[in-house]
Image: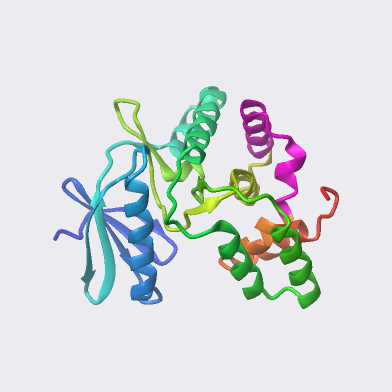
């Protein structure tokens, strides 16, 4: 196994390329359960009609857990957006179409989105009254069983030289309400200081799917709270602001 060619550096993870394989090596904070859960999620998505890298092996590298999967040749959609801003609308259109296709899939053995969000909200440092209000609001939202990526952003999409799209990083995938997934993507754009893209993205998704913007916005406080658990310190205040937004009720 060749671990000389680093192709991506992510928080607490390093991704290497070894020929036609990608080796994602996790740091010591990840437990065996974390790794097996991520691999299981990805294996279940392999059974859908989505283009994703296939897992080949779960192993240990220097005492650290690693997942070995297909290496996909190409550029991230994020890098393409940055390199050619004249095509931003075209790329955003592709991005939304891909998310709609993800949401059209079903995988009945995936964890339930609401269950995960309820757990995440309970783990936050928010006061108990706010937690209770958010959990009651979440329980009242419509139940769906659509595949929801959980971290759908342009850096997790690879466009090959043949213009084929592959979607990466299925560690946060659940089955649930697509509008919650859209709300998370919107907030991810905002966290990245891309407010205009966030607004254009939301407008485009709602137009293409016939979804009322108000319905997606009702998820903002819930999603922001669930996002707080894994957020960086400098993101906390932004997310807290959205937790306390009540205009969309």
| The furthest residue to the left | 1
Q: How many marks?
A: 0
Residue 238 in sight here:
no
Query: Would residue 43 appear left or right of 215 to someone viewing this image?
Result: left
Residue at point 54%, 22% (across, down): 86
Q: Is residue 204 magenta?
A: yes
Whole-percent x, y for residue 148 in the image = 52, 48
Q: Which residue is at a point 37% across and 38% down the rendered structure image?
A: 50
User: Residue at (49%, 49%) from the top-left corner?
Assistant: 149
Q: Quadrant of residue 211?
A: top right
- The answer to whether 213 appears left or right of 204 in the picture is right
**74 vs 139, nearest the viewer:** 139
The quadrant where residue 205 appears: top right
64 inside magenta stretch = no
Magenta span? 196-220
What's the coloring here? Answer: rainbow
- Chief secondary structure of the magenta span? helix
* Residue in the image at 33% along x and 67% along y: 36
**Residue 153 percent across, percent down from the top left:** 51, 44
Q: Quadrant of residue 121?
A: bottom right
Q: Is residue 49 above or below residue 60?
A: above
- The location of residue 34, given as percent across then percent down, is 39, 70
């Amino acid at each position: 196994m060749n671990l000389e060619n680093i192709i991506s550096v992510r928080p607490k993870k390093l991704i290497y390329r070894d020929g036609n394989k990608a080796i994602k090596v996790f740091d010591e904070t990840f437990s065996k359960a974390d790794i097996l859960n991520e691999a299981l999620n990805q294996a279940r998505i392999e059974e859908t009609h989505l283009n994703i890298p296939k897992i080949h092996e779960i192993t240990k590298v220097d005492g650290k857990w690693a997942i070995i999967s297909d290496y996909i040749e190409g550029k991230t959609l994020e890098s393409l957006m940055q390199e050619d801003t004249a095509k931003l609308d075209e790329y955003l259109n592709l991005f939304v179409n891909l998310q709609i296709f993800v949401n059209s899939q079903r995988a009945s053995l995936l964890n339930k989105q609401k269950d995960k969000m309820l757990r995440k909200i309970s783990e936050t440092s928010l006061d108990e009254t706010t937690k209770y209000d958010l959990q009651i609001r979440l329980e009242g939202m419509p139940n769906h069983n659509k595949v929801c990526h959980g971290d759908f952003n342009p850096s997790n999409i690879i466009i090959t030289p043949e213009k084929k799209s592959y979607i990466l990083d299925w560690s946060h995938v659940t089955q649930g309400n697509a509008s919650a997934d859209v709300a998370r993507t919107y907030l991810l754009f905002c966290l990245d200081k891309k407010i205009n893209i966030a607004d254009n993205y939301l407008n485009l998704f709602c137009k293409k799917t016939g979804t009322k913007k108000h319905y997606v916005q009702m998820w903002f406080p819930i999603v922001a709270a669930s996002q707080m658990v894994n957020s960086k310190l400098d993101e906390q205040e932004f997310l807290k602001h959205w937790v306390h937004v009540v205009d969309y009720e």
